[in-house]
Amino acid sequence: MKVVIFCGGLGTRLREETEFRPKPMVPVGERPILWHIMKSYAHYGHKEFILCLGYKGEAIKEYFRNYHWNTSDVTLSLGAKPKIKYHNQHGEEDWGVTMIDTGQNTMTGGRLKRVLPYIKDDTFLLTYGDGVADSDINATIAFHRKQKKILTMTAVQPAGRFGDLEIAAGKVTAFKEKPEKQAGYINGGFFVVDRRISQYLGDDTCVFENEPLAKLAGEKQIVAYQHPGFWQCMDTFREQQLLTGLWNSGKAPWKVW
């Protein structure tokens, strides 16, 4: 199944990194977060990717164009007919990566509309290029097929950012510094989408999360696959450091491969 990944945003809240590269190329450990996301999908058998490029998209093209060169030990035979010999293989050799320039200023709905001609199947996968999870992709697909709606959204409970206070008669009676989960669910991405989504997408100014999702919800065409496990976006430098720390510790929850 095709996997569409939004890779074109400016990533303004992570300006320390995104001034120099697109947000999906910001590293988590020694690899870009985009690689981690793609490895997760590939683990479940989904290895045909369509990347919606925009801001500094050439960096993503360069990364995959030189992927074998940069991840292998090599021997160069110099001369009139130079040769390259790669001494090792990598687990990504059966990936297909289609990179589409969807415009510098195009919004998410417009980006998705621009890449739909590259998708021939009735159903495809969609996510953002800045978040990881240990959600079972194939379980989400099975859930989507059973519900028979246009869009399945993976609903997650992110880690709480602030401490919880218990207050009685104006006095704090208990304080929990870092709650593990916030109470409500939010959109965690990792969508399963029916091609009928095309009817809900507008021009390049269309924001996927605004009018299209609101209209789909009003028509009861969105279902939520509730994922109680790990999920983390990378909006800030602090979150990038959190993910890198988990990866370097060897205990990254999203590493299912």
Image (cartoon, rainbow, N blue to C red):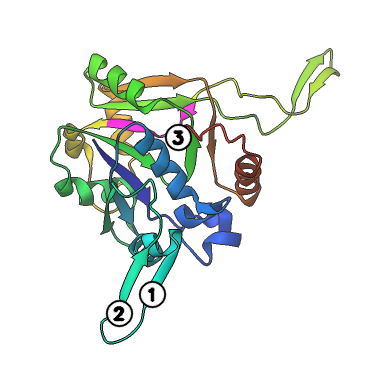
Q: Secondary structure at mark 2?
A: loop
Q: Nearer the viewer, residue 96 or 232?
A: 96
* Residue 33 screen position, x and y as percent: 49, 48
Q: Secondary structure at mark 1?
A: strand
Highlighted range, magenta: 186-192
Q: Is residue 28 left or right of residue 6?
A: right
* Residue 93 screen position, x and y as percent: 32, 50
Q: Quadrant of residue 184?
A: top right
Q: Is residue 163 left or right of residue 115?
A: right
Label 1: few (<14), some (14–19) or many (≥20) C-alpha neighbours in 10 Å: few
Q: Which residue is mark 3?
A: 257
Q: Amino acid at mark 3?
A: Trp
On the rendered image, what quadrant is the C terminus found in? top left
Q: Amino acid at mark 2?
A: Pro
Q: Which numbered marker is on residue 76?
A: 1
Q: Nearer the viewer, mark 3 or mark 2?
A: 2
Say which residue appears at 43% left-offset and 60% top-offset: 72
Q: Quadrant of residue 91?
A: top left
Q: Marks 3/2: CA distance?
A: 36 Å
